[in-house]
Amino acid sequence: MTVDIIGWVATAIFAGSYLCKDPRRLRWVQALAACLWMVYGAVIGAAPVLVANLLVACFAVFSSFRPFAARKLPDPSRA
């Protein structure tokens, strides 16, 4: 197995993430791809690839836990 395979798998997962209908799942799949890119960056010794994808993974995971702005809760005053 060559190192390039890790990069190609990460690319395929990231591209496939756009097929996710659920925004939370999209973020988790993108975080997975970013983790693979981090491994790839570490193996080839490319700190910018590693750091950039560390940020992407952190933001993807963090944003999957916050409430979505588009989600509307019922207004209790109208009940």
Image (cartoon, rainbow, N blue to C red):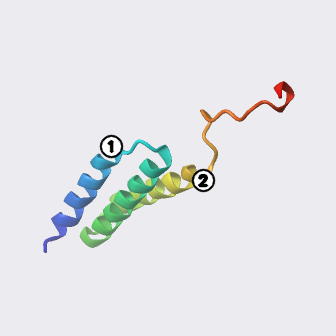
At label 2, which amino acid type do we have? Phe
How far apart marks 1 and 2 lie (CA) works out to 20 Å
x then y, percent, for residue 55: 47, 55
**Residue 28 versus residue 5: which sits nearer the camera?**
28
**Which mark is nearer the camera, 1 or 2?**
1
Residue designated by label 1: 19
In the picture, the quarter occupied by the N terminus is: bottom left
> Which is more toward the observer, 70 or 73?
73
Question: Would you name the residue on which mark 2 appears?
Answer: 65
Q: Point out residue 5 in the picture as x, y percentages from the top left corner.
A: 17, 65
Tell me if residue 52 comes above or below residue 38 in the rendering: above
Residue at 30% x, 65% y: name it: 41
Extreme-top residue of the structure:
78
Mark 2: few, some, or many residues within 10 Å (few <14, many ≥20)? few
Locate residue 57: give its quadrant. bottom left
Q: Of callouts 1 and 2, which one flags the residue occurring earlier in the amino acid sequence?
A: 1
Q: How many marks?
A: 2
Residue 26 versus residue 10: which sits nearer the camera?
Answer: 26
Q: Amino acid at mark 1?
A: Leu
Q: Position of residue 34 (x, y in %)?
A: 37, 58
- As helix, strand or loop, the secondary structure at mark 2 comes to helix
Q: Quadrant of the C terminus?
A: top right
Relative to the observer, which residue lies in front, 61 or 18?
18
